[in-house]
Image: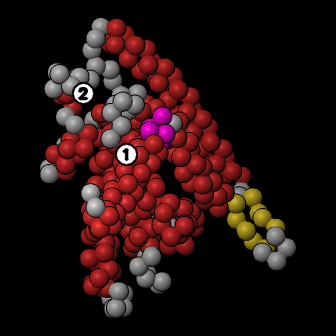
């Protein structure tokens, strides 16, 4: 090869070397992430849940205490009957937690016996609770989107005012606003990179992780992601028609209707998760199995497929 040919082919050979280096680097990073994938998934989920739990406790304290003197910072504890109601609520919550623990122990024992008989096990309480994280994320993200529409009108608050007519808009806002603000601050931080990371965590870390999670968990995680994507697309179309107009009665009605329908679909998914079943929504079911694989093929090797 002459010097002229070498000079002409040098850029091509340089680009090829760079491509090989990038592929090697990407494979090295992917291999490293794959090795620490399982502990990394649960660590990131814990980091995601802790701020939400903190906001939930803040909302609970807002219900438990009434601030009557903001200048002196004095808080009045609720009267005796209201305090008794709060104590009864805590007692019920503790009893439910104890019941869930005992029920989980029973389910684990049943799973152990069914695995010995080479049968499919049932979905445990822990697995159902872990699956609810995906739907909670989708619900909070959707509520956050609709809450940011108008400064003087909030479709989620208006919706819950109709569901709970005895509560005012301020009381409902005091409960859900801290949680929504926390979710927005998490997902929109670092120019949206954190929100993208949550999506990748749910989609690749859980939804397509066949070696670690059951079909039930993967099915509902993928469904929550697809539903959130559909609701986001729907919301942006709605926002396209309303971003330059005031909060008219028609737009308010459409906003409440869209939010209530979307929330109803998510509640169906949450109900199916609590019952330990898949939803089998039309069209979405086939799209989910494209990512998770068929339930009938669960546990089969490559040659079996």
Residue located at (58% from left, 49% from top): 47
Looking at the rendered structure, the number of numbered marks drawn on it comes to: 2
179 vs 97, nearest the viewer: 179
Residue located at (34% from left, 91% from top): 244
Task: Using a 10 Å C-alpha cutoff, classify the residue at mark 2 as few (fewer than 14 neighbours), some (14 to 19) or many (20 or more).
Answer: few
Task: Using a 10 Å C-alpha cutoff, classify the residue at mark 1 as few (fewer than 14 neighbours), some (14 to 19) or many (20 or more).
Answer: some
56 is higher (above) or lower (below) than 156: above
204 vs 169, nearest the viewer: 204
Quadrant of the rendering where the N terminus is positioned: bottom left
Residue 156 image-quadrant placement: bottom left
Q: Residue furthest right?
A: 72
For residue 298, the mark is 2
Residue located beneath label 1 in the image: 204
The answer, for residue 233, to whether it is visible in the render is: yes
3D distance between C-alphas at marks 2 and 1? 18 Å
Q: Is residue 150 left or right of residue 1?
A: right
| Range of magenta residues | 31-35
254 is higher (above) or lower (below) than 271: below
List x then y, in percent, for residue 145.
41, 70
Residue 302 image-quadrant placement: top left
Q: Earlier in the sequence, mark 2 or mark 1?
A: 1
- Model colouring: secondary structure
List x then y, in percent, for residue 104.
47, 24
Quadrant of the rendering where the C terminus is positioned: top left
235 vs 225, nearest the viewer: 225
């Amino acid at each position: 090869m002459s010097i002229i040919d070498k000079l002409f082919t040098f850029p091509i050979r340089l680009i090829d070397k760079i491509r090989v280096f990038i592929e090697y680097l990407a494979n090295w990073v992917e291999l490293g992430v794959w090795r620490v994938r399982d502990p990394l998934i649960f660590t990131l989920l814990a980091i995601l849940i802790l701020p939400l739990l903190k906001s939930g406790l803040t909302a609970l304290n807002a219900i438990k205490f009434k601030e009557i003197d903001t200048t002196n910072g004095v808080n009045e504890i609720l009267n005796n009957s209201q305090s008794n109601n709060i104590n009864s609520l805590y007692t019920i919550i503790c009893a439910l937690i104890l019941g869930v623990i005992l029920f989980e122990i029973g389910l684990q024992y049943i799973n152990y016996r069914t695995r010995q008989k080479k049968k499919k096990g049932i979905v445990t309480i822990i697995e159902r609770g872990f699956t609810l994280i995906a739907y909670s994320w989708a619900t909070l993200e959707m509520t956050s989107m609709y809450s940011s529409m108008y400064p003087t009108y909030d479709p989620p608050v208006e919706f819950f005012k109709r569901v709970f007519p005895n509560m005012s808009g301020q009381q409902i806002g005091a409960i859900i606003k801290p949680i929504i603000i926390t979710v927005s601050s998490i997902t929109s931080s670092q120019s949206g990179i954190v929100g993208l990371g949550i999506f990748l965590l749910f989609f690749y870390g859980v939804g397509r992780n066949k070696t670690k999670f059951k079909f039930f968990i993967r099915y509902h995680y993928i469904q929550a992601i697809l539903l959130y994507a559909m609701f986001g697309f729907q919301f942006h179309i709605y926002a396209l028609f309303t971003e330059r107009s005031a909060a008219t009665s028609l737009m308010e009605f459409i906003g409440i209707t869209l939010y209530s329908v979307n929330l109803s679909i998510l509640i169906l998914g949450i109900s199916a998760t609590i019952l330990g079943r898949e939803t089998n929504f039309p069209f979405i079911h086939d799209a989910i199995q494209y990512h998770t694989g068929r339930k009938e093929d669960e546990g089969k090797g490559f040659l079996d497929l």
